[in-house]
Amino acid sequence: MISFEKAQEIINREIDSLVIDHEPVELYQPVKYILSIGGKRIRPTLVLMACSLFSEQVTRAIKPALAIEIFHNFTLLHDDIMDNSALRRSQPTVHEKWNKNTAILSGDAMSILSYQFITDCSPDILPDVIKLFTTSALEVCEGQQYDMNFESRNDIKVDDYIKMITLKTSVLLAASMKLGAMIGGASSSDSDLMYEFGKNLGIAFQIRDDLLDVYGDPGKFGKKIGMDIIANKKTYLIIKALEVAEGESEKILRRLISTNDINPAEKITIITGIFNRLGIREMAEIKSKEFYNKSLRAFDLVTVDTHQKKSLRDFAKQLMERES
């Protein structure tokens, strides 16, 4: 099978050469812009890698892989509006560079464009591909709504959080794996196992991201540490701390996650100190490893020779060891 680097190179080249010259230009310029400012492009790369696990005809998966990337960027474009974010990948967000109305409409256009690309696959699998894509797309929206609901709630449990990140983050990763497998001619059982591999890896990835926001190296992480704390986001660390904290620690934690009336640096220091006393970092690392191991168990059951799985297994390992 092809390596992550090779698959990523193909995706980058295809996106760079993508022609979106429809009119009016004011609608499509933001689409070109958001796709041009980079990103790791993990999901479309995984489509190609998963396809190559079952078939050498990887080119068949390129258009559907681009559909996944276009849809993913559409969600980011709208997320930036909802979060009132000024930057995306160190560049101005679409609503900052143009305006919110343009960002909303261009995002809508991207969601429709993604359907144009996803249908470029073999007619015999098209109904299943459309079912997978539409189900996953709707689940991403459900996950975003849960995330928004959590902003005003302090009774969130770990299981609630896992459900939310499964929908918001990991189902698209899972769909990417399954989509590539389907295009590559995998059996339905192997395609389902690839979905489980991607889903559990996605959950592990998000918990790892939560950890890096607090304990990452700022020079390697690529953004300021503690931004989730400042934004009062309900991450795994916060939710787990609320479950196990008692007495004064619980009171302080609940007060701090409900206010912005404190110096941000001081807020980060106090909450990180509570995490350290409660052993939250270790709990998060154990939970992330739990889902990582679950993903590998599913991958091990895929009926392909072990040596052919090396590139995807190496990618999963790198994802869990990442520092940025």
Image: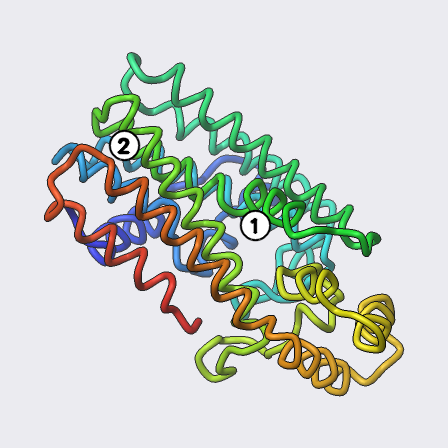
Indicate the quadrant where residue 26 lies.
top right
Q: Is residue 284 above or below residue 294?
A: below
Given this view, does label 1 or label 2 mark the residue nearer the observer? 2
- Foreground residue among 192 and 99: 192
13 vs 273: above or below: above
Q: Which residue lies under the disc numbered 1?
A: 30
Horizontal arrangement in the rendering, residue 10 relative to residue 253 (left or right) = left
Position in image of residue 49 (x %, y %):
24, 44
Q: Quadrant of the C terminus?
A: bottom left
Q: Secondary structure at mark 1?
A: helix
Percent x, y for residue 78?
Answer: 65, 47
Task: Estimate the x, y position of residue 305 in percent, counting from the top left.
Answer: 11, 40
Crowding at dot 1, Cα within 10 Å, few <14 / some 14-19 / many 20+, comes out as: many
Local SS, label 2: helix
Image point (55%, 43%), residue name: 166
Which sits in the foreground, 15 or 179? 179
The residue type indicated by label 2 comes to Ala
Judge the density around disc 2: few (<14), some (14-19), many (≥20) Cα neighbours within 10 Å: many
The residue singled out by tag 2 in the image is 181
- Nearest the viewer among 240 and 147 is 240
**Please, what is the three-letter code of the amino acid marked with disc 1?**
Pro
* Side of 97 relative to 315 (left or right): right
Residue 124 sits in quarter:
top left
x and y, in percent, of residue 90 in the image:
54, 70
Q: Give the number of marks.
A: 2
Most foreground residue, 193 or 149:
193
Query: Which quadrant, please, contains the N terminus?
Result: top left
Nearer-N-terminus badge (1/2): 1
